[in-house]
């Protein structure tokens, strides 16, 4: 029988599907056509049946699903290291919000997202869920970079660099829902910043919009102890209790962080089939506390991993998040059996896809799903020998072991060379801007007249 021609075959490596049954083919191969996986299985079978117009030889390497980052603020790469070692409230009010008011515009968002996209592709991430301003720019950068993104304009009550009023913010979001609703790489969502920065009215209107378009509804919830205390003082309810009272909990609701949760909160999240986006390194660095992941998993709540923004992490490396999540919960529980390697990897693949309502298309290597995968080098000292590949990925692999990244069947990094982004140009621009931000912060030189085209993509 003649072999069928397809767009791409990735052959010869160990294929870790990360599907429900944790199927592994060694050696295996994957065939992709029209951006979708059309076949995967033992190497010889796939090689016999499919001929790729493009062929990647992954012999001796690992082929696995690309990682999904369930929560970040991508453009904040440009604020990385601007203020560390301070509490969240101080960090936000004294440093981040003033810096955002001063510097964030469409140019800033474009450049910050390009930098983030380069870092994420290099560390094997194929999708990130973003909350920030000027999300139309984020979408355009990702289209060009060939990276998947879930966009969500951060909705707040107060004027910000992007819009003046909450109504304008909602309109901006509705525009994004209509514009990007059918895109192959960009998926819109609705993302109020939090229960303490958005009024009950705004939160409800935003939820109505999310329901109308059937997209995820994400917001920061119970990140700090003081947020919970304030909620109880003002509303006599925990943040999750308030979400339930306002009718905002449901299968598409994602509580970002969910650190300080009572048993009642967990029961509410489970009953409403809501999810949690857990960002362990940001929670560690800001000493926010720790999402009770073992309890959430036990209650059947979906949990995805995220990096949070680069100014609070301080990187966008999902390998780091997996390793940290797997380790830190063991210490907290005093039990080395909790959050095992499979669970940690799932939270960055299939579970993250379930959190975002995208598990029909993403999160594992299966026929019919999108062709999103990464190829890792196994020929490095810290990964030799292999007894259990999943253990290696969570406890020993480095982000820099990722050699090749494929999104929707398109190769965006080949053998560590980025094919869609000009890093030299991005780095030069980022350094130039950082010089002006630093000078402004130190008041060593007059505030620079930052040139901005204010050009906004339509
Ligand atoms: Zn965040």
Image (spheres, helix red, strand yellow):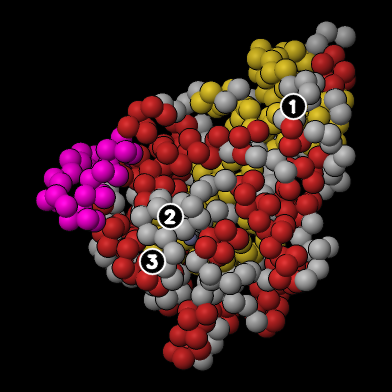
Q: Nearer the viewer, residue 185 or 438?
A: 438
- The secondary structure type at the circle numbered 2 is loop
Secondary structure of the residue carrying numbered label 1: loop
- Residue marked by disc 2: 311
Q: Residue at left 46%, top 74%?
A: 195
Q: Residues within 10 Å of mark 3 (few under 14, many from 20)?
A: some
Whole-angstrom CA distance, mark 1 to mark 3, is 41 Å
Figure check: 452 above or below 266: above
Residue of label 1:
379
SS assignment at label 3: helix
Badge 1 density bin: few <14, some 14–19, many ≥20, Cα 10 Å? few
> Would residue 148 be seen by someone viewing this image from the given angle?
no
* Residue 228 marker: none
In the displayed structure, 178 sits above or below 115; it is below
| Residue 155 image offset from top left, x and y in percent | 39, 63
Boundaries of the magenta span: 429-458
Residue drawn at 27 percent across, 38 percent down: 432
Indicate the quadrant where residue 161 lies. Answer: bottom left
Q: CA distance from mark 2 to mark 1?
A: 33 Å
Q: Which badge, 2 or 1, comes first in the chain's sequence?
A: 2
């Amino acid at each position: 029988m003649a072999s069928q021609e397809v767009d791409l075959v990735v052959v010869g490596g160990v294929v870790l599907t990360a599907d429900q049954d944790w199927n592994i083919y060694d050696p295996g191969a994957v065939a992709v056509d029209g951006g979708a996986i059309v076949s995967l299985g033992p190497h010889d079978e796939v090689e016999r049946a499919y001929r790729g117009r493009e062929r990647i030889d992954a012999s001796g390497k690992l082929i696995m699903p690309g990682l999904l980052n369930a929560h970040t603020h991508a453009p904040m790469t440009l604020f990385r290291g601007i203020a560390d070692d301070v509490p969240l409230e101080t960090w936000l009010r004294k440093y981040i919000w003033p810096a955002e008011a001063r510097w964030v515009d469409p140019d800033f968002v474009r450049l910050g997202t390009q930098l983030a996209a380069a870092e994420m592709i290099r560390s094997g991430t194929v999708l990130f869920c973003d909350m920030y301003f000027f999300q139309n720019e984020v979408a355009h950068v990702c289209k060009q970079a060939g990276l998947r993104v879930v966009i969500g304009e951060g909705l707040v009550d107060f004027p910000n660099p992007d819009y003046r009023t909450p109504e304008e913010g909602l309109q901006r979001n509705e525009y994004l829902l209509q514009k990007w609703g059918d895109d192959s790489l960009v998926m819109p969502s609705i993302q109020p910043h939090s229960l303490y920065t958005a009024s009950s009215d705004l939160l409800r209107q935003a939820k109505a919009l999310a329901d109308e378009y059937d997209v995820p509804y994400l917001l920061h919830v119970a990140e700090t102890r003081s947020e919970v205390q304030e909620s109880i003082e003002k509303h006599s309810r925990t943040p999750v209790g308030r979400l339930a009272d306002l009718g905002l909990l449901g299968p598409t609701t994602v509580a970002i962080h969910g650190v300080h949760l009572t048993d009642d909160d967990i029961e509410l999240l489970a009953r409403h089939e809501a999810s949690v986006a857990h960002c362990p390194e940001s929670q560690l660095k800001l000493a926010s506390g720790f999402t009770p992941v073992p309890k959430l998993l036990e209650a059947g709540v979906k949990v995805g991993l995220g990096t949070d923004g680069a100014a609070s992490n301080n990187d966008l490396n999902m390998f780091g998040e997996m390793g940290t999540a797997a380790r830190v919960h063991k210490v907290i529980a005093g039990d080395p059996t909790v959050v095992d390697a499979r669970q940690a990897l799932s939270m960055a693949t299939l579970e993250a896809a379930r959190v975002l309502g995208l598990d029909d298309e993403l999160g594992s290597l299966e026929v019919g799903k999108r062709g999103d995968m990464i190829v890792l080098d196994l020929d490095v000292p810290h990964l030799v020998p292999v007894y259990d590949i999943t253990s290696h990925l969570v406890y020993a692999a480095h982000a820099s072991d990722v050699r090749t990244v494929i999104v929707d069947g398109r190769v965006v990094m080949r053998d560590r060379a980025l094919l869609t982004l000009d890093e030299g140009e991005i780095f030069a621009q980022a350094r130039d801007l950082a010089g002006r931000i630093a000078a402004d912060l130190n008041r060593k030189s007059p505030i620079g007249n930052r040139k901005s085209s204010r050009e906004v993509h339509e």
